Image (tube, helix red, strand yellow):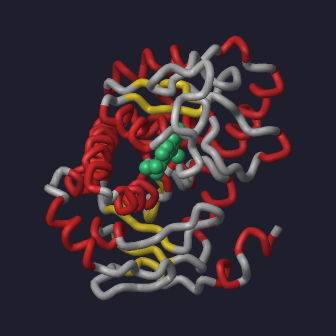
Amino acid sequence: MSADHIAAGPPPGARPDWTIDHDWSAYSQAEHDVWTTLYERQAGLLQGRACDAFLKGLDALDLHRGGIPDFSRINEELTRLTGWSVVAVPGLVPDEVFFEHLANRRFPAGRFIRKADQLDYLQEPDVFHDVFGHVPMLTDPTFADYMQAYGQGGMRALGRGQLHNLARLYWYTVEFGLLETPEGLRIYGAGIVSSLAESIFALDDPSPNRLGFDLERVMRTPYRIDDFQQVYFVIPSLKSLLKATLQDFAPIYERLSQAPDIAIDEMAPGDRVFTCGTQAYALAGGRLASA
Ligand code: HBI
Ligand code: FE
């Protein structure tokens, strides 16, 4: 999600760190019903598609009962497992606020939920995208460490003006990442697991490229914010993702500042190719064409 249209200061009623009270009792039954509809559509589909860490986290946090979960209830278990907590925010927050929360093991989740007539697509992350999509992976100790390392890296990148490289890393891992397993490719990216159609497209469709994850290569690859991805990157393990972020980024940023972007549908020398995609979906005009 493009965070460039965010206001300078926190909106009225929000604290200086942009957090707001979750105020779980203020959700309407209609809002809880949207959560239950989305949850029931996704949870069944994800068996055999989402990675074990995600499915284990979904179970551990018991997100299915009773509509939109109360963050204070989730946080009891989440904090016990990895020291993370979910905090409510009004929507997208400025990059430096976002990274500061991640660096302190706080995941900012939009409090609002999408309307019943916009189940399949929304611009800003709502509570379903954030809590169903992102939070289960935060119960995995390795991924929990990765997300905190990402937040710390984000704050350094901001200082160097290299945020766009880091946003690509976030996009192609935290939002749209795939994991290689002996049973085949599995999803760990929140943007995919929270989308019915993309949970199918990302694994089954012949259209997108599926390439082995390489940190610098990913940082040179633009992404789509308005439609299914044209390329997905595959990590061999969550440990390998964490390891990739624990190196010194300075030499990488030096090389990146001289390296041109790699076109979103291109293969690059050295790519490990799981799928050489047809790009048929994008060439046919993507979501708008198939609407
Ligand atoms: N704010 N609430 C919220 N959620 C996000 O995922 C988010 C954000 N602000 C900035 C942002 N993401 C992006 O800059 C990241 O991709 C780096
Ligand atoms: Fe997200």
Residue 75 percent location from the top left of the image:
45, 19
Q: Residue at x 44, y 26 (%)?
A: 17
Q: Is residue 52 above or below residue 141?
A: below
Residue 178 visible here: no
Q: Residue at x 31, y 35 (%)?
A: 103
- Horizontal arrangement in the rendering, residue 245 relative to residue 173 (left or right): left
Q: Residue at x 37, y 27 (%)?
A: 84
Residue 289 percent location from the top left of the image:
79, 75
Identity of the residue furthest to the top in this view: 25
Q: Quadrant of residue 257?
A: bottom left
Q: Residue at x 55, y 42 (%)?
A: 133
Q: Nearer the viewer, residue 68 or 57?
A: 68
Q: Is residue 226 above or below residue 280?
A: above
Residue 226 percent location from the top left of the image:
64, 63
- Horizontal arrangement in the rendering, residue 246 relative to residue 162 (left or right): left
Viewport quadrant of the C terminus:
bottom right
Identity of the residue furthest to the front in this view: 8
Q: Quadrant of residue 96?
A: top left
- Badge count: 0
Q: Is residue 206 above or below residue 160?
A: below
Q: Nearer the viewer, residue 4 or 262?
A: 4
Q: Quadrant of residue 160?
A: bottom left
